[in-house]
Image (cartoon, rainbow, N blue to C red):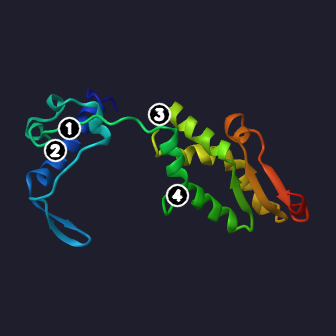
Amino acid sequence: MASDTKGADVSRQGVQRDLLPIVEGSTVNTKYGPVKSDHILFMAAGAFHTVKPSDLIPELQGRFPIRVELDALGRKEFSRILREPKNALLKQFQMLFEMKGVNLRLTDSALAAIAREAMKRKSGARGLRAIMESCMLDIMYEIPSQPDIRECVISEEVVTIRDSPLLLYEGTLESA
């Protein structure tokens, strides 16, 4: 079925119209009960970062009076996102591997390569998971059929040229 709409513009206006009652001040039902949005400071980001105030629907134009442009995340920020939060991606993957009795280790250069790839793709922090999964997808499927694997080391080469990770098997850990 063909459509005469422009996709992104229509979607953005729909989102703006849906947000309008909340931004104007209303009572919104949440899972924690009703919340009055009369005295809430709203900050818009995401899809709004590419638009000028004049691109907003007229009802929203005066509701976001201050415009600040943010710098893109850099290698340091991506590296911190991978390691530091309570539920950091690195910790999630390590726990996933631990469930199969395998210690997952990513070298500092591998984490830096993941950060560089996210910068290159301009995918933001959300793209980090996809990059990590693409590096480890094969080994995640191999581990269940090889119960003697005890450690998996992801190096920069695994991230950049899709080299195979270093696998340490039971009995070889003493030399590692």
Give the spatial CA distance, label 2 vs label 3: 28 Å
114 vs 103: above or below: above
Q: Quadrant of residue 159?
A: top right
Mark 1 and mark 2 in contact? Answer it, CB < 8 Å.
yes
Q: Position of residue 60 (x, y in %)?
A: 12, 40
- Circles 4, 2 touching at the beta carbon (< 8 Å): no
Closer to the chain start, of discs 2 and 3, is 2
95 to the left or right of 124? right
Identify the disc placed on residue 17. Answer: 2
Q: Label 1 to label 2, Cα distance in Å?
A: 6 Å
Label 4 and label 2: CA atoms lie apart by 34 Å
Instruction: Find disc 3 in the rendering and name its residue.
Output: 122
Q: Residues within 10 Å of mark 1 (few under 14, many from 20)?
A: some
Neighbourhood count class around disc 4 (C-alpha, 10 Å): few under 14, some 14–19, many 20 upward: some
Where does residue 129 sit, x and y in percent of width and height?
Answer: 54, 49
Residue count near mark 3 (Cα–Cα under 10 Å), binned few <14, some 14–19, many ≥20: few
Circle 3: element type:
loop
Q: Split into 4 quadrants, where in the image is the N terminus? A: top left
Q: In what element is the residue under mark 2?
A: helix
For marks 1 and 4, the one nearer the N-term is 1
Residue where numbered disc 1 is placed: 13
**Residue type, numbered disc 4:** Ala
Task: Check disc 3 and give the amino acid type.
Answer: Lys
Q: Residue at x 16, y 38 (%)?
A: 66
Residue type at mark 1?
Answer: Gln
Q: CA distance from mark 3 to mark 4?
A: 20 Å
Q: What is the three-letter code of the residue carrying label 2?
A: Arg
The residue that disc 4 covers is 88
Question: For residue 110, what is the image quadrant?
Answer: top right
Image quadrant where residue 33 sits: bottom left
